Every structure is written in structure tokens, then in C-alpha cells.
């Protein structure tokens, strides 16, 4: 599904950007061709003006004669002109041929004044046979005042225009496909980046669905079995009451499970600034000790809290941080045998505050340590269902700590206890680091 969506994104990105690129390349080529042709026409026109400047009108006894001796190429008494011209012709005002240089033209001028593009054949040679070549022809009326002296017609090969345009076409023919390939690759990469949040959300949804279906199956089966027995003809009211109480306990378990799953599904990324406040970790830990003390006493455990005299302040969401540390204390009480000790220690090593939960419990095998913060992970001897819980406490604790830009780690030795360590950034000058912003 995601690959298809990514392909669609890459396809439309390539199509849109490729269309823009091809359109831009076409406009670039057309403008380059126009500019070069205009420059060539200007040069050809200036050449025609130079030649027309040599035309002289001679009048003798009311007889007018046009003298072309001073016209470059056409005359004999002129300096040599650049011979890039293919031909030069002079026509009388009546459009009759008077003088020419180059190919033999028609006796009458047929071309209109202005520029015309011609396809003419080059004279054949031993090395190369005759081939068509494009020329630019200019027919210029030469005037003296209001009177037309004649028509000057010249033509030159368009090689100075065609050769750069041919190189440009070759460049575009190679560059445009390469650019389209780069656009397609970029679209594929950007499509993957754009799909990443959607993929993560979908994976979270799948994870939530899988976790919920996996963990709710057994409680639902328990409710169903107890309810079916309760629907039978009652034999023992006390037994029926016990089954109803079992249904209540399972429902409470399911409610807590769903709440924890929803928390993990909804929390994403770091906490925003407006949810954080400056709190004293010492005061928070004292509240946690008071809340956990009854559980420790019931389990015949000693709970010791060590905090510094000076306040240790961090920017945090108090309820979430309270929940993370409470989960660690609850686990310590659950997996520490009677007569053991749990230490809650607060220190600071700038720029971080350090919270440690140490116990003398059963410990964790080294093979299980990399997975201890995974959802629903249970080691056979450590996180079994007999001890209670659903296997989400440490996952929630890690999620909360990382949302505060902190770190959580564990060290443990089997049968000697475990130490969970939380590191949180200290609050300096009451300013939040930009790392907390999403």
C-alpha cells in the first residue's frame, strides 16, 4: 500500500516537474534561436547598409545612371568585404537585374523586401556531394529621399546560427532525460520522506491493534466463561458472587490495559513547550515515596529515598514523569522478595539530573536486557504473568522519558537486583532547549 502511494507521489512529482522542465527547455531553445537569428539579421542588415552606401546616382543631361563601382563586391573600385556572403545582386527600380556576384539569378526580382530563409544546394566537391544548406536572404530597397534607386539583395549561410543551436539541441537531448531521471529519483526519495509520518502512524495503529487483540483475548475469554457459568441455574450464591467479582476484576484489568495502550498510541515525539513546567524532582520523589510506601510495607520491603538538600529542577510534565517513576517503583516492589530493599536516589551531574531506582530483587538475565523496554515483553523468570501487570510499565516509562529529551537505562545481575537510571536535562535559566520543540 505504501509503496503504491509512494510510486504515485513520485509519478505525479516527476510528471509535474518534468512538464515544467520540458516547457522551460523548449522556451529556452526558442528564445536562443530567436536571439541568434535577430543578431544574424542585424549583422546582415548592417552589411547591406555598408554596400548600399557605395551606390552613386549620376545625372547628366537629364539622364540618370546608377554607378555601382564603389559598392563592395559589386564594384571594382572598393575595398574587399568579408566574403561570408553567398551572393550579392542589384536590381533596378523596375526589378530588373543589373549586376550580380555569385550564382546566376533570375532576370526579374520576385522576392519581397525584407528577410527570407532559403534552402540552397552547396556546390558539389570531391570530398562531399551537393547538400542543401540554409541561407538568410535580405532584399533591401535603396532610396535617396523618396526616390528608389534600386534593390540590393544579399544572402549569407546560417551556419553561425545553426551550429550553436545544434549544440544546444544536443545538450537538451542529453540533459533533459538526465534531469528527468534525477527528478524521478528525487520524487521517489521525497515520496518516502513524505510517507514516513503516515507509515509511522499506520505502524502505530497496527501495533495498537495487534497489542490490543493479543492482550484482550484472554480477559475476554475469562469474562465470557464466567458470564456463561453465571447464566446457569445458580447452585451456590457464594460461587456466583465470586464469578461476578472475577468479571469485575477482569474488566478493571482491561480498562487499565486499554488506557495504557491508548497512551502509547497517542504520544508521539517530544512534548511541546506549553505542556512543560519547572518542577523540583526532590519534591516529586517524596510524593512518590509516600504513595509507594503502603505497597512496600505490604510486600515487607524497605523503601529508602535519598535526595539532595538543594532543589533539582527540570522542565517536565509532572503527571507523566510521576507515572514513569511510579512504574519503576512498582516493578521494583513486584520483583523484590520480602525482606529486600528499594533505593530511590536523586543526584545531579550537570547538565543532567540523575534518578536511580535500585532494588535487591531477582534481577534480569543479560539476554533479556535489550528487550526489557519492549511492549508486552516478559522474560520467563522475570516478567511472568504471575507477578501481575501487562508488560507495558517499562515501555511507558521509556516513552515518557524520551518525550522529555531524557534517557533511561538498566543494569542488572540475576539474583542480585537491578538498577534503572533516568537522565533528564536540568532546567537552566528557566529556558527550554529547542530540542523539545517538534
Image: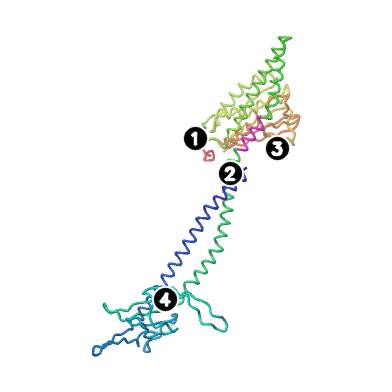
Badge 4: residue crowd in 10 Å (few <14, some 14–19, many ≥20): many
Q: Main secondary structure of the magenta part?
A: helix
Q: Secondary structure at mark 2?
A: helix
Q: Mark 4 touching mark 2, by CB under 8 A? A: no
Q: Secondary structure at mark 3?
A: helix
Q: Earlier in the sequence, mark 2 or mark 1?
A: 2
Q: Mark 1 touching mark 3, by CB under 8 A? A: no
Identify the residue position indicated by label 2 in the image: 195
- Residue 262 locus on image (x, y percent): 60, 30
Give the Cα separation between the discs numbered 1 and 4: 81 Å
Q: Residue placed at 40% from the left, 75% from the top?
A: 43
Give the Cα separation between the discs numbered 1 and 3: 35 Å
Badge 2: residue crowd in 10 Å (few <14, some 14–19, many ≥20): some
Q: Earlier in the sequence, mark 1 or mark 4?
A: 4
Q: What's the magenta region?
A: 202-212
- Residue 61 locus on image (x, y percent): 23, 90
Give the Cα separation between the discs numbered 3 and 4: 84 Å
Q: Earlier in the sequence, mark 1 or mark 3?
A: 3
Give the Cα separation between the discs numbered 4 and 2: 60 Å
Q: Mark 1 touching mark 4, by CB under 8 A? A: no
The quadrant the N terminus occupies is top right
Residue 370, numbered circle: 3
Q: Work out whether 369 lies above or below 64.
A: above
Identify the residue position indicated by label 4 in the image: 137
Identify the residue position indicated by label 1 in the image: 430
Residue 211, magenta (yes or no): yes
Residue 188 or 246: which is nearer the viewer? 188
Give the Cα separation between the discs numbered 3 and 2: 29 Å
Residue 320, numbered circle: none
Q: Secondary structure at mark 1?
A: loop
- Residue sticking out furthest to the left: 61
Amino acid at each position: 500500500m505504501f509503496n503504491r502511494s509512494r510510486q504515485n507521489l513520485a509519478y505525479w512529482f516527476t510528471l509535474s516537474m518534468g512538464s515544467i522542465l520540458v516547457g522551460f527547455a523548449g522556451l529556452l531553445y526558442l528564445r536562443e534561436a530567436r536571439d541568434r537569428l535577430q543578431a544574424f539579421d542585424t549583422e546582415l542588415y548592417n552589411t547591406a547598409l555598408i554596400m548600399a552606401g557605395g551606390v552613386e546616382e549620376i545625372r547628366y543631361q537629364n539622364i540618370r545612371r546608377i554607378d555601382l563601382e564603389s559598392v563592395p563586391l559589386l564594384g571594382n573600385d572598393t575595398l574587399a568585404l568579408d566574403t561570408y556572403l553567398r551572393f550579392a545582386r542589384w536590381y533596378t527600380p523596375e526589378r530588373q537585374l543589373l549586376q550580380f556576384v555569385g550564382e546566376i539569378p533570375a532576370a526579374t526580382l520576385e522576392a519581397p523586401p525584407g528577410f527570407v530563409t532559403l534552402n540552397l544546394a552547396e556546390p558539389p566537391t570531391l570530398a562531399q556531394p551537393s547538400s542543401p544548406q540554409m541561407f538568410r536572404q535580405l532584399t533591401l530597397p535603396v532610396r535617396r529621399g523618396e526616390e528608389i534607386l534600386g534593390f540590393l539583395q544579399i544572402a549569407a549561410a546560417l551556419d553561425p546560427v545553426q551550429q550553436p543551436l545544434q549544440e544546444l539541441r544536443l545538450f537538451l537531448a542529453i540533459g533533459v532525460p538526465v534531469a528527468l531521471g534525477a527528478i524521478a529519483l528525487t520524487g521517489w526519495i521525497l515520496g518516502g520522506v513524505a510517507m514516513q509520518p503516515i507509515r509511522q502512524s499506520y505502524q502505530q495503529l497496527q501495533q495498537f491493534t495487534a497489542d490490543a487483540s493479543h492482550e484482550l483475548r484472554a480477559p475476554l475469554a475469562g469474562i465470557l466463561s464466567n458470564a456463561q457459568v453465571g447464566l446457569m441455574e445458580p447452585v451456590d450464591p457464594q460461587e456466583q458472587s465470586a464469578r461476578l467479582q472475577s468479571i469485575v476484576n477482569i474488566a478493571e484489568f482491561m480498562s487499565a490495559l486499554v488506557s495504557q495502550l491508548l497512551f502509547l498510541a497517542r504520544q508521539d515525539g517530544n512534548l511541546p513547550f506549553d505542556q512543560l513546567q519547572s518542577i523540583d524532582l526532590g519534591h516529586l520523589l517524596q510524593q512518590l515515596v509516600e504513595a509507594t510506601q503502603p505497597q512496600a510495607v505490604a510486600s515487607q520491603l524497605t523503601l529508602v529515598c535519598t535526595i539532595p538538600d538543594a532543589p533539582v529542577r527540570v522542565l517536565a510534565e509532572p503527571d507523566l514523569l510521576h507515572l514513569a517513576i511510579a512504574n519503576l517503583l512498582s516493578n521494583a516492589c513486584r520483583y523484590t522478595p520480602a525482606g529486600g530493599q528499594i533505593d530511590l536516589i536523586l543526584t545531579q551531574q550537570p547538565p543532567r539530573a540523575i534518578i536511580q531506582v535500585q532494588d535487591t530483587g531477582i534481577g534480569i538475565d543479560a539476554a533479556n536486557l535489550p528487550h526489557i523496554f519492549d511492549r508486552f515483553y516478559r522474560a520467563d523468570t522475570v516478567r511472568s504473568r504471575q507477578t501481575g501487570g501487562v508488560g507495558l510499565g517499562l515501555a511507558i516509562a521509556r516513552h515518557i522519558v524520551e518525550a522529555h529529551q531524557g534517557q533511561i537505562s538498566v543494569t542488572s545481575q540475576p539474583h542480585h537486583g537491578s538498577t534503572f537510571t533516568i537522565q533528564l536535562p536540568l532546567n537552566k535559566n528557566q529556558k527550554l532547549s529547542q530540542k523539545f520543540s517538534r
